[in-house]
Image (cartoon, rainbow, N blue to C red):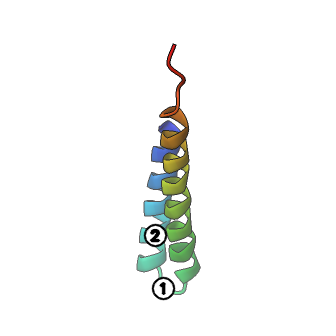
Amino acid sequence: MALFLFLLIVAVVLGFIGVLAEGLLYLLIIGVLLAVVAVLYLGMRIRRSGRRPAR
């Protein structure tokens, strides 16, 4: 969960820098891609942890 939050914070910071700084649109794109990766990571982690065998 900490890795997800870290990736999400980095994505938001890169997005803000990409929007505010003129000529750094690629940072916005990297931020969006990083946010998508973070959400996919969280989804995979939740799916994996939900399948624990019953004893």
Q: As displayed, is residue 38 above or below residue 22?
A: above
Residue at x 47%, y 79% (from the top left corner)? 21
Observer-nearest of 43 and 23: 43
Q: Secondary structure at mark 2?
A: helix
Residue at (45% x, 69% y) in the render? 15
Q: How many marks?
A: 2
The single residue placed furthest to the front in the displayed view is: 55
- The percent coordinates of residue 43 (x first, y second) are 49, 49
First in sequence, mark 1 or 2: give its number: 2
User: What's the mark number on residue 9?
Assistant: none
Q: Residue at x 51, y 63 (%)?
A: 36
- Residue 18 higher or lower than 35, as above or below: below
Other-residue count near label 2 (Cα within 10 Å), few / some / many at <14 / 14–19 / ≥20 = many
Q: Position of residue 11 (x, y in %)?
A: 49, 61
Residue for badge 2: 15
Q: Do tag 1 and tag 2 residues touch (Cβ < 8 Å)?
A: no
Question: Which residue is at the front of the view, 50 or 19?
Answer: 50
Name, please, the residue furthest toward the bottom.
23
Given the image, on which type of amino acid does mark 1 rest?
Glu
- Residue type at mark 2: give it: Gly
Up/down of 47 relative to 26, above or below = above
**CA–CA distance in space, label 1 to label 2:** 12 Å
Residue 36 visible at all:
yes
Structural crowding at the residue carrying mark 1, measured as other residues with C-alpha within 10 Å and reported as few (<14), some (14–19) or many (≥20)? few
Camera-nearest residue between 31 and 18: 31
Q: Is residue 46 above or below residue 9?
A: above
Label 1 vs label 2, nearer the camera:
2
Give me the disc on residue 22. 1
Q: Secondary structure at mark 1?
A: loop
Instruction: Judge by depth and name the residue closer to the eye, 14 or 39.
Output: 39
* Residue 53 in the image, given as x and y percentages of width and height: 54, 23
